[in-house]
Image (cartoon, rainbow, N blue to C red):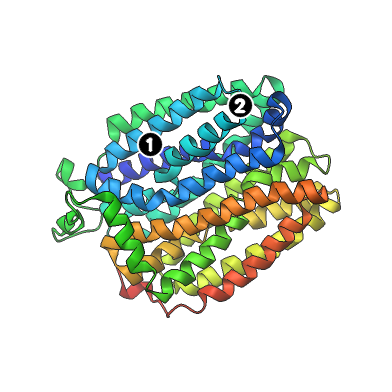
Amino acid sequence: MRKIHYSWVVLAVTFIAIIVAGIIRSSSGIFIDPFETEFEFGRPMISFAFAVCLFLYGFSGPFMAAFVDVFGLKRVMLNSMAILSIGLSLTFVMKNEWQLILIWGVMLGIGSSLFLTVLSTQVANRWFVKRRGLAVGILTAATATGQLILLPVLANFVENYSWRAAIALIFLLSTIMLIVIGLFMKSWPGDIGVKPYGQEEDTTEQLHQYGNRNPFRMAISSLLEGIKAKEFWLLAGSFFICGLSTSGLIGTHFISYCISFGIPLVTAAAMLSFMGVFDLIGTTISGWLTDRYDNRWLLFWYYTLRGISLLFLPFALAQGSYTWLVIFSIFYGLDWIATVPPTIGLTRHKFGVEKSAMMYGWITASHQVGAGVAAYTGGVVFKVFGSYMWAFLLAGGFCILASLFVILLKKHNPREFV
């Protein structure tokens, strides 16, 4: 029997860690109504706290990439998961709005940053030479799939027990994940005497070049380099719209939008879960396609199709038909974060393997600015108009604009670049 390369073990541990971090961050949509009811927090304030989380986890990304280069992948993963666990435990004693912002904005934002921004790139760059696109696709799928599949479970806990029971569940998951990371995660293939998957020559040391440099200086210098390149702005601009149209809008407000049409909480969460199943399929396939086809055209079609689906959603809900809602969930789910593997591929192509993690971290920061804008303005739109319709229609239009951004990038043949 052929021995499994340890790269796949690292991939599995990372996959589960991303799922746990993803469900912790994305569970915010489940708690909007309970927090509003119990603490009498206004919806704009709750939306603001969640927007801070989205903003911070995005802008922490490039610094997390630098911390990994200086302090090691395993150590940064352990510290990040510990912050998530502590933040969840503090939720049980939360009483005031500033505590909501500190816990669900600052702590959970920083704690989830590594897992939901640059971790997939770091693991793929360090542990894979062949199948990098596929590895990124699998790990990216975990970002949305795990959080969406577990949402109905949390919704059931909220509806049948209390929001505290739901918090206790994800706190338990984060604690278990700390143990798993401690036991099985490794920072480099060389730590256990193996080479990255698919590598024949011993060239792994090239990625150690940063040594003991200042991580903050490393992150800022990469940003200064990036802003001089047209490709950086085009990728960052399209990713801003990606964040606006996914975690910021759908991830934060989809459940509340469904509830406003009389759809039960558990059913709305189940729709998000349904999207997660198809996200796993779509994003994994996207990773496979990223290794083979021009990444620009992949992004063009992903953004175009996502825009069409968002324009369709208000119609689906207005029809009061679960069939139309299921159709939307399938269509949108396939494209939830399929944009990530080709975006990473284009970043790696432009800036090289060694710099790609931090560069992608800054591009992801733009993604999270878009997510934060949508998370906050979605709540404001609902307060002003009594409906989320205009928020979703505008997001659909912006996705069409993003498809035009990416097609301006230079032609990219992934078969000529590893």
Residue 50, can we see it?
yes
Q: Position of residue 351 (x, y in %)?
A: 32, 68
The disc at residue 96 is 2
Vertical placement of residue 41 versus 378, above or below: above
Q: CA distance from mark 1 to mark 2?
A: 25 Å
Location of residue 2 (image quadrant)? top left
Location of residue 11 (image quadrant)? top left
Closer to us: mark 1 or mark 2? Answer: 2
* Residue contact between numbered discs 1 and 2, judged by CB atoms under 8 Å: no
Q: What residue did someone put label 1 on?
A: 80
Q: Residue at x 46, y 77 (%)?
A: 409
Q: Nearer the viewer, residue 392 or 41?
A: 41
Q: Residue at x 63, y 53 (%)?
A: 374
Q: Residue furthest right?
A: 319
- Left or right of residue 184: residue 87: right
Give the amino acid type for the residue marked by disc 2 in the picture.
Asn
Where's the C terminus, which quadrant? bottom left
Residue 131, can we see it?
no
Q: Position of residue 368 (x, y in %)?
A: 52, 53
Task: Determine whether the residue tagged by mark 2 lies in a helix, strand or loop.
Answer: loop
Q: Earlier in the sequence, mark 1 or mark 2?
A: 1
Q: Residue at x 35, y 47 (%)?
A: 64
Q: Residues within 10 Å of mark 2 (few under 14, many from 20)?
A: few
Give the amino acid type for the residue marked by disc 1 in the picture.
Ser
Vertical placement of residue 160 versus 247, above or below: above
The disc at residue 174 is none
